[in-house]
Image: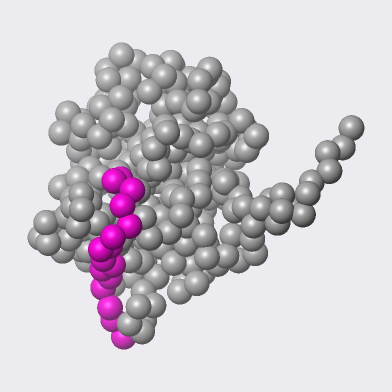
């Protein structure tokens, strides 16, 4: 039985923005390529190349998954706080540690620590990482833990599909896994043109949130936008800008695809850590995590 829509309902349906934007199946390849490109001339070039190498292993895991995470009951079907307590994701960490070739003795030591840790200790570290308690996790372990978790959850997201994902209670919370947003992405093509989607720090799900609104306190007044201007970009045309809220003293980086169609959230974030330092000096606090980097560490 079909349902007929009145003219007003048709217009509302046509103008309603798509809620979700799922990542492509080659997400980690795209990130690796972007990180490799951004490493040239960047003061953190060595770290960006390290992150690119991690992303290449993430893509291999994604293409040859050890396991698929189960879904859980509740509003977030891939709730990280619940699923990280299971053992399934640890097979992704084991596979990542087997597949990554350490480039330094420090990286090898971190991998050895994770390889020798028991399942309980790994879960404790993962829970602390996902809850933002970076000070409780050895900094050298963060990118390896984060990379394994991202690969496992992104694979589970695409296996899940859009129909099972509903809006979360807060703007900055991923509706699929409950993790905080890492960055915003301003889309520029088709039905997504001009829309803002927040990028999950864990599963890479993107969900629609209206623009010019603080995702943390939800106020719209007095928002400021900071970027690093250089000769490559005209004023106001920077591909990455930080939306700063004077009300709650927080900020969120945003990637503008109309200014750089190849930009990508995680790589843009890591390549712009100098902007974080500037905003910290301005009195703004960062609430968005990047699971490939421990705050204060390289």
**x%, y% of residue 58?**
47, 42
* Residue lying at 49% horizontally and 27% vertically, measured from the top left: 76
Left or right of 183 in this view: 45? left
**x%, y% of residue 178?**
42, 32
Left or right of 8 in this view: 210? left
Asked if 280 appears above or below 150 in the picture, the reply is: below
Q: In front here: 166 or 227?
A: 166
Predominant SS along the magenta part: loop
Q: Which residues are magenta?
A: 216-232
Asked if 96 appears above or below 122 in the picture, the reply is: below
**x%, y% of residue 22?**
57, 46
* Residue lying at 32% horizontally and 31% vertically, measured from the top left: 130
Q: In front here: 13 or 230?
A: 13
* Residue lying at 42% horizontally and 33% vertically, measured from the top left: 169
Query: Was residue 223 drawn as part of the magenta stretch in this picture?
Result: yes
Q: Is residue 108 visible?
A: no
Query: Was residue 203 drawn as part of the magenta stretch in this picture?
Result: no
**x%, y% of residue 110?**
25, 34
Image quadrant in which you'd find residue 171: top left
* Residue lying at 21% horizontally and 31% vertically, measured from the top left: 133
Placement of the N terminus among the 4 image quadrants: top right
Left or right of 191 in this view: 252? left
Asked if 267 appears above or below 288 in the picture, the reply is: below
Q: Is residue 165 visible?
A: yes
């Amino acid at each position: 039985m079909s349902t007929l829509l009145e003219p007003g309902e048709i217009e509302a349906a046509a103008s309603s923005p798509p809620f979700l934007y799922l990542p492509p199946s080659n997400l980690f390849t795209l990130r690796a390529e972007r990180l490799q490109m951004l490493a040239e001339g960047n003061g953190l070039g060595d770290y960006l190349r390290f992150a690119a190498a991690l992303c290449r292993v993430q893509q291999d895991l994604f293409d040859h998954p050890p396991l698929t995470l189960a879904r859980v009951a509740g509003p977030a079907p891939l709730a990280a706080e619940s699923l990280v307590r299971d053992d399934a994701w640890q097979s992704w960490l084991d596979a990542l540690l087997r597949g990554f070739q350490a480039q330094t003795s420090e990286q090898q030591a971190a991998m050895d620590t994770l390889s020798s840790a028991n399942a309980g200790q790994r879960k404790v570290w993962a829970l602390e990482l996902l809850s933002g308690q970076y000070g409780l996790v050895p900094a050298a372990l963060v990118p390896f833990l984060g990379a394994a978790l991202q690969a496992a959850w992104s694979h589970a997201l695409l296996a899940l599909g859009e129909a099972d994902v509903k809006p979360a209670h807060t703007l900055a919370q991923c509706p699929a896994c409950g993790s905080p947003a890492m960055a915003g992405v301003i889309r520029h093509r088709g039905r997504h043109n001009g829309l803002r989607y927040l990028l999950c720090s864990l599963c890479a799900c993107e969900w629609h949130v209206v623009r010019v609104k603080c995702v943390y306190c939800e106020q719209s007044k007095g928002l400021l936008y900071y970027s690093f201007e250089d000769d490559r970009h005209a004023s106001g045309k920077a591909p990455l800008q930080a939306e700063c809220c004077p009300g709650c003293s927080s900020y969120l980086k945003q990637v503008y695809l109309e200014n750089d169609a190849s930009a990508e959230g995680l790589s843009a974030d890591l390549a712009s850590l100098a902007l974080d330092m500037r905003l910290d000096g301005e009195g703004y606090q960062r609430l968005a995590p990047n699971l490939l980097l421990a705050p204060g560490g390289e």
